[in-house]
Structure formats: structure tokens, C-alpha cells
Amino acid sequence: MNTNDIVTNGMGPELTGTTHQHGGRPVASENVSITAGPQGATVLNDIHLVEKLAHFNRERVPERNPHAKGHGAFGELHITHDVSAYTKAQLFQPNTVTPVAVRFSTVAGEQGSPDTWRDVHGFAVRFYTEEGNFDIVGNNTPTFFLRDGMKFPDFIHSQKRMGPTGLRSADAQWDFWTRTPESAHQVTYLMGDRGTPKTSRHQDGFGSHTFQWLNAKGEAFWVKYHFKTRQGWDCFTDEEAQEMAGKNADYQREDLFNAIERGDYPIWDVKVQIMPFAEAETYRYNPFDLTKTWSHKDYPLIDVGYFVLNRNPVNYFAQIEQLAFDPANLVPGVGLSPDRMLMARAFAYADAHRYRIGPNYRQLPVNQPVHPVNTYAHQGPMAYQFNPASAPVYTPNRFDKGAGYLDDGVSSNSGYGAADELFINPDPHGTDLGRAPYVAHPEDDDFGQAGILYREVMDDGAKDRLAHNITNAMVGVSPETEQRCYWYWDQVDPQLGAEVRKRFAAKK
């Protein structure tokens, strides 16, 4: 199946002539309802009127909680380099071409919010492979605010609208961030230039998490994904982003659509960092901590290929709003890791889709794998694929439907073996259940990498914009939270903390 097949999958025929009710009967009028006399009451048994209005009332599905405002497109992944020494995944083998779908989004805003608000920007990629759908659901930053999924609802609540006012609260945001020091690295990214990319085309993407690759020999490696824009970086200033939010709330959505329509197809180079399996135990940072990066000096970027976006959706609702990414969509040769945020997302994303779209959301054309799916799941709301009458709905059974690749297909006393479809990780720290912090590595702390980002990566202009953006975002904080903000940025860098104090005093 190619990209055109993905984009047109599920599209109905173009029909002309008399319209029909949903059951197929010809419609008498799309303009005039049935009344009891010329000025009488509208009758409830005007079937088409009731069906038309009832369907209209149900046109929207619940929006995503985070990442509600988004847009996307389709294209192809091209593998140009040989990384088979690290992974047996078919989509990463040399010269392979795989259809892709990409969705860009903000995090905190609702569907109708401006896509140029200062925010982390989601960067989600689906690969429609011959071995199943493979999703990398990341952002335009290599890190995140948290390292444990338990905190995620609290984080999102602090960024969303407050109960009494229905308004977003700078005090709530900063109160949460400053009481969650692990957020410092990501907040430094957010308050810098990456928080206001000018377009979706002019930003990098990251898988952010640590994942696992497994090669044909059964050797495991830890991997981080990087998507490097060929268009070059381009960012708004804080003031430009706010101005554009008022002029065109859909600026980035419009930009991507128009660029593809005119044939200016955006391209991202796909690169990875590879960490040998054993080095994870002794690396200077805990490599599974989502608030940390791996130094490019320690693990340089390795070329894999590129993907290009060259097809716009035919129907935004069907193909972007109902496009359901899931970090648990894995294929042989790729896996998860002990990253707690990743493991939490492997549950939460599919559960969110079951709520938003229904338990059979994977049957929607845009979410279907390119090969037939053999499963014992059946029934449920909106099941429009059903099993043949001869197919059993339970396993084990006496029929030829099949079972798992570790099962013997004869009895339920089978299926034992390594869970290498998730990840291989001989546990060096014991297997007793408990609640423990991440294992601290020699250089692990909450503010160190944020300080490196400020001192060693940002130039003087970027440092100036960072202090400016931080103090803009602090407007509205309570006196107590204001003091916590000063402490927070002092920990990142004393010079930055002093600059935040000076500038915010002038803005209060």
C-alpha cells in the first residue's frame, strides 16, 4: 500500500443527483421541513429533519485533552543508510519506502486556540509498515517536563483553564513548575525560541523518549529519534507570536496545507542516537529519564533516511482529527524502555482513543494497518468490520484461526517466553515491586542540563529572549509563586535568576 492508498482509504464515491436519507431512501427536500399546515408545528416524524439535525448534533467527537489543536499531512519515509546492525525492523532497512502520517499540535490549547501560542509543539509520526503501524509520538523538544506518568494529569491541569474562572493561570503554571524541579530543562526550552516556532515546517521533531532497537542477532540497543528539518529553523519572537495569534489562529495549519498544495514539500532527515545496551547502566545521566538528553559528543547522530510530506488530507476530520497515534504501536525490531513516562503513555493513549472515538477506533480507515489484522476482538460500538461466520471468537480452539507466536495453538498451557516484543532489560536493580526514584547516575540533577542549555547552547540573543519570555509568562503570578520562580531560575543559572528578577520588577 502506498501513500495514495492511505489518503484515499475509506473515501466514498462522488455522487450526484437526488440526495438520500442515511438508510438510502430518496430525500424529498433538503430545504423545507414538514409542518401541520402552512403555519403549524413542525412534525416530529419528519424523518429527514430529525435525522439531519440529530447527526449534526453529533458531528464532533470529544477533543483530545492535551494536544487538541493540531494539523497534519501524509508522505513517505525513505531509508538511505544501513542501520541493520542495530535493528531488524523492516521499515528501517536500506532503500525501504514506507507511507507516513504526521500530526503537529500544541499541548495546552483547545481545538479553536491559536497554534502560535507559546507552547511545546507535538510532533507525532505514524509509519504504515508491512509489519503493522509504528507510531513515534514526540514533540519539538528532546525532553519533557516530567519523568513519571503519575504526575501527568496534574501537569496538564496546571496548564489548562481553572475551575472558578475558566481562564488559564500563570500562577498555577509556575506554582506547578517550581514545585516540580525536574521540569527546569523543558521549561528552559519552552521559554526559549522553540516555544514559538513560526511554522510546523521550520522546526525539528524528536521521539524524546528512549526506545529500544533489536537486531537480527537478538542484540539490543537503546535509541533516541531525531527529525531534523531541511527547511531550517524559523521562530517568532514572543510579541510576533501573540500578534499572529490575533491575526490568524490557524496560521501554522494554513501554512503547511498551502506549502504542500503548491508543491513545496517539507522534508525532515531522520537520525538516531544509539547507546550500546550495557552502557545505560553507567552513563553519567540516567538514559531513561525523559527530562534529560544524551550528549551528542557521547552519542553522535547517525543518519537513517528522510521523510517528505507531499499529500494533504482529503478530509480533515476523518484523517487528522480521528488519526489516533499510540506509543504502544510497535513492530518487530523496536520496543519500549524503562522510561516511566513512555510506559504510562503506552496505556494512556489507546485508552484516550477508546473514549474519544470508541473501542473500534483502529477500524477507522486512517488507523488501519496496511495488512489484514487477525484478532479475537469483536463486537463493540461502531464495529464495521466483523468476523466470518466460521471464525471462532475465543482461543485456544479447534479451528485454524491461529494464536500468538509463542503459543502452541492447541492448549492454554503455552505462550511462555521472553517478552522481547516490549523490550529486553535484564533488571540489575531487583524485581520487587515498590515506589522508588529513578536510579541516580553521576551527573543527574534537575537543573544541570537546563544550565548547560543556557550557558553553552544559547547565544547572547537567545539568552536575552529567554529572560524576556520568562518574565512575560510570569505576569499574573502570586507573590509567593514569584519568589519560587526566582529560586527556580537561580538553580538553572544565577545570572539568569538575577536577570529574571530585574526584568520582572519592571513588568509588575
Image: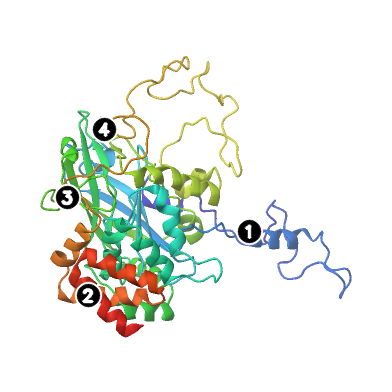
Labels 4 & 3 near each other (Cβ < 8 A): no
What separation in Å lies between label 4 and label 2 (alpha carbons)? 41 Å
Tell me: residue 217, above or below residue 1. above
In the depicted structure, whether residue 461 falls above or below residue 363: below
Provide the residue designation for mark 2: 498
For marks 2 and 3 on the same chain, the one whose residue lies earlier in the sequence: 3
Quarter of the C terminus within the rendering? bottom left
Looking at numbered disc 2 in the image, what kind of residue is underneath it?
Ala
Q: Residue furthest bottom?
A: 506
Classify mark 4: helix, strand or loop. Answer: loop
Mark 4, residue position:
429
> Which of the two labelled residues, at mark 4 and mark 3, occupies the earlier sequence position?
4
Mark positioned earlier in the residue sequence (4 or 2): 4
Horizontally, residue 101 falls left or right of residue 42, namely left
The residue tagged 1 is 58
Kindly tell me whether residue 83 is visible in this rendering: no
- The answer to whether the residue labelled 1 contacts the one labelled 3, judged by CB atoms less than 8 Å apart, is no
- For the residues labelled 4 and 1, the Cα–Cα distance comes to 51 Å
> For numbered disc 2, what is the local secondary structure?
helix
Marks 4/1 in contact by CB < 8 Å: the verdict is no
Q: At which x and y percent is residue 124?
A: 36, 54
Q: Residues within 10 Å of mark 1 (few under 14, many from 20)?
A: few
Q: Position of residue 241 (x, y in %)?
A: 35, 77
Which one is closest to the eye, mark 2 or mark 1?
A: 2
Q: CA distance from mark 4 to mark 3?
A: 19 Å
**What's the distance in space between the residues labelled 2 and 3, CA to CA?**
25 Å
Query: Picture coordinates of residue 231 (x, y %)?
Result: 23, 66
Q: Position of residue 444 (x, y in %)?
A: 21, 50
Residue under label 3 = 443
Mark 4 and mark 2 residues within 8 Å of each other at the beta carbon: no
